[in-house]
Image: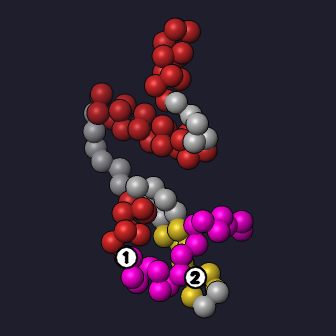
Amino acid sequence: MLIDTNQIITKTQLRKNLADVLMLVKEGKELVVSDRGELVAKMSPVMIKRKTSGVGQFMAEVKQLREKLSRQNPDFDSLKALREMRRES
């Protein structure tokens, strides 16, 4: 398992900055907690599926896709991609 060192926080950092760490996780960041140099836990956001219909569901799916693509490529511009898709249609 490959882990980006930017994703690792120590138990002490977690304890001192719990509110900030939870906010990062809520925003989609996955973190690994270490205790005395040993990786012991993984924190990741909980994805709750809410019943939505029509436009609301579509917008939720677009938001998820945009976030996923932005994590994979920080330079990704979702608005530009949508405009290009409209022109091609």
For label 1, the crowd category at 10 Å Cα-Cα, with few meaning under 14, some 14 to 19 and many 20 or more, is few
Q: Is residue 18 above or below residue 51?
A: below
SS for tag 1? Answer: helix
Whether residue 16 appears in magenta in the rendering, the answer is yes
Q: Is residue 28 above or below residue 60?
A: below
Q: Coloured how?
A: secondary structure
Residue 46 shows in the view: no
Where residue 41 appears, as percent x and y from the top left, is 54, 78
Give the CA separation, mark 2 to mark 1: 14 Å
Identify the residue under disc 2: 34
Outermost residue toward the right? 2
Residue at (35, 50) in percent of width and height: 49
Of pointers 2 and 1, the one earlier in the residue sequence: 1
Where residue 36 appears, as percent x and y from the top left, is 60, 91
Looking at the image, residue 53 sits to the left or right of residue 26; the answer is: left
Residue at (28, 44) in percent of width and height: 51
Q: Is residue 31 above or below residue 88?
A: below
Q: Is residue 33 above or below residue 83?
A: below
Please provide the residue range marked out in magenta: 1-17
Looking at the image, residue 87 sits to the left or right of residue 18; the answer is: right
**Residue nearest the viewer, comparing 35 with 57:** 35
Q: In the image, what residue type sits under mark 2?
A: Ser
Q: State the mark number for residue 18.
A: 1
**Residue nearest the viewer, comparing 72 with 64:** 72
Question: How many labels, in total?
Answer: 2
Residue at (49, 59) in percent of width and height: 29
SS for tag 2? Answer: strand
Q: Quadrant of the N terminus?
A: bottom right
Q: In the image, what residue type sits under mark 1?
A: Leu
Whether residue 63 appears in magenta in the rendering, the answer is no
Image quadrant of residue 62?
top left
